[in-house]
Amino acid sequence: MNYLLKTEPSVYSFANLEQDKTTIWDGVTNPAAVKHLREMRPGDRLVIYHTGDQKSAVGTASVVSVDPTDAKNPQVKIKVGKVIAKPKTLADVKAQRLFADSPLVRQGRLSVVPLSDPQYAWLMG
C-alpha cells in the first residue's frame, strides 16, 4: 500500500525526518486517519506532504513497523526515503483527474491519505 502523510513543516518537516532517519508518526487524532495508520504494514510506501504555506509533496519514506496495541494511537515507525525532485503542489494534484475521488482533494483535513499505485507514481514524477 501507499499512503500520504501530512505534516506542518514548522512542527516536523521532511528535513527533520532526513536528520532523524526514523521517527514514530504520532499526533494523529482523526478516526479515519488513525484507521489508515492501523492498516499500515512494514514496507508500505509513504509520501511526506507539507501543509501550511507549502502545500506540496516533498519526500518519501517507508513503514518500518506498526504497533497497533493502542487502537486510538497506533505506533507507526517510519524511515526516511528521498526528496521528491520536483515537488507536486496541491494545485497540481487538483488538476489531475487521477485524484478526483481522492481524500487528498475531497477531505482536505485528513492527515493520512491512502494512495493508489498510479497516484503514487504520479507524485514521484
Image (cartoon, rainbow, N blue to C red):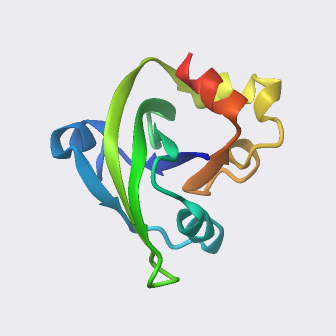
Q: Of 107 and 26, which appears nearest the observer?
A: 26
Q: Position of residue 70 (x, y in %)?
A: 45, 85
Q: Is residue 92 above or below residue 55?
A: above
Q: Residue at the front extreme?
A: 42
Residue 116 image offset from top left, x and y in percent: 71, 39
Indicate the quadrant where residue 100 lies. Answer: top right
Q: Where is the C terminus found, in terms of image quarters?
A: top right
Q: Residue placed at 54% from the left, 22% from the top?
A: 124
Q: Residue at x 64, y 22 (%)?
A: 122
Q: Residue at x 62, y 24 (%)?
A: 121
Q: Is residue 1 above or below residue 116?
A: below
User: For this rendering, which residue is in front, 94 or 71?
Assistant: 71
Is 58 on the left or on the right of 105, as rendered?
left
Say which residue appears at 48% left-offset and 48% top-offset: 6
Toward the viewer: 9 or 123? 123
**How many labels, in total?**
0
The percent coordinates of residue 43 (x first, y second) are 46, 47
In the displayed structure, would residue 122 be above or below residue 9? above
Is 67 rendered above or below residue 90? below
Q: Position of residue 22 (x, y in %)?
A: 25, 50
Q: Is residue 102 left or right of residue 67?
A: right
